Amino acid sequence: MPASAEAPVSYQLAVGDARINVNELVGRRVRLDFDGVIRCIHCDRTTKKSFNQGYCYPCFRKLAACDSCIMSPEKCHFHLGTCREPEWGERNCMVEHVVYLANSSGLKVGITRGTQVPTRWIDQGAVDAIPMLRVSTRYLAGLAEVACKQHVADRTNWRAMLKGEVPELDLEAERERILGLIGDDLAQLRQEHGEDSLRVVEESPQALSYPVEVWPSKVKTHNLDKTPDVEGLLEGIKGQYLILDTGVINIRKFTGYEVRFRVLD
């Protein structure tokens, strides 16, 4: 579900070749009908089950984008010569990454490619986020994140995020606090990987708002695999979720599913 950082965040829903402005549909009744067909987003073959949000099993097994080091970048093995797709690794992992702090349901640390700011923050439903480090590779970003995780969470409480239960935080002050706690770790990383491989940044935080009219008091999820027809009043959009009065649905989870999307009124 492509999005752009406007006030509020602007969302589009890709349905076939069409792009639907979903913000304009908040307050209207919508329906999603899954016809039972799932296509791999890489090779386009039909698959009975989607792996890693959109891939068939063979692609899941062979593509670098589905390797375990994507979820655990500190396990990157590109430097060992064992990357599944070295050219893909050069384009996506051996490039500048940002280690950041975000407030989605409380303070968390994360990493993303420099080109994915602020898209990654929007995906997580962050109300504000701030860069902390810029590093030369995904592997180094993962090592820096591991150091941070001793002092701050790396997960979002997605239920709290969808309820709008987000505390106010001073991210600039939190950045200084975390940097002070991991100073020795950063010095060690510079010694091992070079002084220019990692730099602290003083960039300003970015605030984000979302098109939500009603926050759910209780979060119920829709699953197209179990209930292929989903209908409800669209009350908002946040992160990768459509918030309906009948429950929420994670659109990214069903990437590759053939779905008919209709506006009912």
Image (cartoon, rainbow, N blue to C red):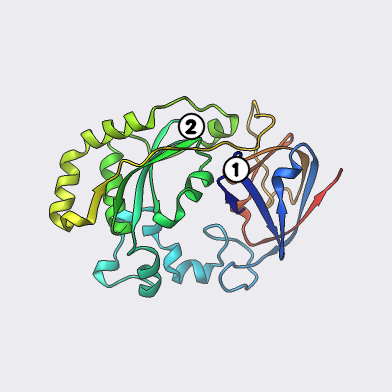
Residue at the spot 45% in from the left edge and 50% down from the top edge: 117
Residue furthest left in the image: 191
In front: 74, or 176? 176
Residue 172: give x, y in percent of width and height.
Answer: 35, 32
Identified by mark 1, the residue type is Val
The mark closer to the camera, 2 or 1, is 1
Report the residue marked by disc 1. 9
Residue under the image location 63 percent in, 32 percent down: 219
* Residue 120 shown left or right of residue 230 in the figure: left
Direction from residue 35 to residue 222 in the image, left or right: left
Give me the residue at 53% from left, 46% from top. 123
Q: Secondary structure at mark 2?
A: loop
Amino acid beneath label 2: Ser
Crowdedness of circle 1 by 10 Å Cα count: few (<14), some, many (20+)?
A: some
**Residue 187 rendering spot, x and y as whole percentages:** 15, 46
- Spatial CA distance of label 2 from label 1 is 18 Å
The residue tagged 2 is: 105
On the image, the x and y values in percent for residue 156 come to 47, 38
In the image shown, does 188 or 6 lie closer to the viewer?
6
Q: Nearer the viewer, residue 2 or 43?
A: 2
Give the class, few, some or many, for how many residues have Cα within 10 Å of label 2's Cα (few <14, many ≥20). many
Secondary element type, mark 1 = loop
Quarter of the figure that contains the C terminus = top right
Labels 2 & 1 near each other (Cβ < 8 A): no
- Residue at 62% of width from left, 53% of height from top? 1
Side (left or right) of 24 relative to 112: right
The picture places residue 127, in percent across and down from the top left corner, at 51, 35
User: In which quadrant of the rendered view does residue 132 lie?
Assistant: top left
Q: Check the image and report above or below for 41 versus 127.
A: below
Identify whether 29 is placed above or below 168: below
Badge 2 or badge 1: first in the primary sequence: 1
Q: Quadrant of residue 150?
A: top left
